[in-house]
Image (spheres, helix red, strand yellow):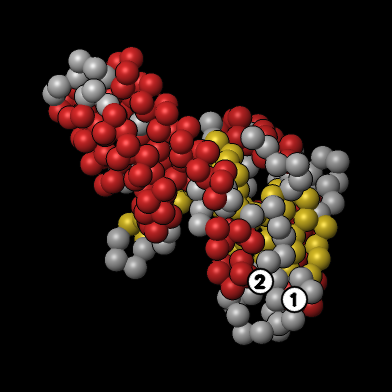
Amino acid sequence: MLPSNNLYHYTSAAALFGIIEGKSIWASNINYLNDEKEYVYTVELLRPHLEKLKRESSNKGLVEQLVQWIEKAEGGPTYVTSLSSQPNILSQWRAYCRNGGFSIGFTRDGLQEIVERCGLTLTQCIYDREKQEEKVVSFVDGLASAISSEGQAISSREGAHQFYANNVYKQLIMLANEIKHPAFHQEEEWRLVKLFVPANDPNLKYRPGNAMLVPYFEINLLPPAEESEKFLPISDVCVGPHKNSNLSEKTLRTFLAGQTTECSGSPHVKVWQSEIPFRQI
């Protein structure tokens, strides 16, 4: 699925500089995010349907084991980058740009090229309860069908684990990345998702955290052959609320002009300010 318009990434001045200079954006491992309650919310929606599946399935042992794994599942080597269809939301400024920041607008065509080249999935988060229920029912119906066709003879833990890997885990992680609590609907979030990154992937890198190394997946925003010729697929940058927003806008314009001068087509990146009154957000 692709958006109808640009999508925006809210970030700090340091990250904006890194994105443009490095021509890449970082996707975070979902086990290191502060969104663990999102998965719990998904499991809560799944639970009554899974209980019904246990009651109705002819292989209750397999279903009970699968439900245990679903309840305790982790994201594993899965990486996400958050975007929004809205360029100027107070909640996002507060969450990601408390000391000033920017929302970077990526073009629809640019995102499509990145998704195809890097093997990503671009998914739109769902906040509506009825649509969430449809997704959950579809997931459980697919699981029931797989059990009916492939799972009747499975009796060992090893067989159950292989069935889980083949028919449940990937679908479950994608479902959890789509469903968000309705309270966050104003974010209008989309996510770039990279599933199952192997440990030897050259784009898997690490940064120092407060007490541990933190993994991230580096998404190259341009094909390597075009990095010296083209500017990034950025349409505009919004300067967030800040006491020095006028100076920030002026400096950003100068910086971008220097970055785009040598690029083909002399790309123009619109720079504009949020009209939200500044508070110490």
Badge 2 crowding class, 10 Å Cα cut-off, few under 14, some 14 to 19, many 20 or more, is: some
Please give the name of the residue rendered at 71% of the width and 82% of the height, measured from the top-left corner. 278
The picture places residue 200, in percent across and down from the top left corner, at 35, 35
138 and 208: which one is in front?
Answer: 138
Please give the name of the residue rendered at 63% of the width and 42% of the height, measured from the top-left corner. 221
Quadrant assignment, res 236: bottom right
User: Is 78 left, or right, of 123 in this rendering?
Assistant: left
In contact (CB < 8 Å): disc 1 and disc 2: yes
Quadrant assignment, res 270: bottom right
The picture places residue 20, in percent across and down from the top left corner, at 65, 54
Q: Is residue 169 above or below residue 48?
A: above
Badge 1 crowding class, 10 Å Cα cut-off, few under 14, some 14 to 19, many 20 or more, is: few
The picture places residue 112, in percent across and down from the top left corner, at 67, 35
Kind of residue sitting beneath label 1: Ile
| Circle nearer the N terminus (1, 2) | 2
Residue that label 1 marks: 276
User: Is 151 left, or right, of 36 in this rendering?
Assistant: left
Q: Is residue 178 above or below residue 253?
A: above
Quarter of the image where the N terminus is located: top right
Please give the name of the residue rendered at 68% of the width and 61% of the height, measured from the top-left corner. 103
Please give the name of the residue rendered at 79% of the width and 70% of the height, measured from the top-left corner. 273
Quarter of the image where the C terminus is located: bottom right
Kind of residue sitting beneath label 2: Leu
Q: Secondary structure at mark 2?
A: helix
Residue that label 2 marks: 90
The picture places residue 257, in percent across and down from the top left corner, at 81, 58
User: Is 15 left, or right, of 106 in this rendering?
Assistant: left
Q: Is residue 15 above or below residue 265?
A: below
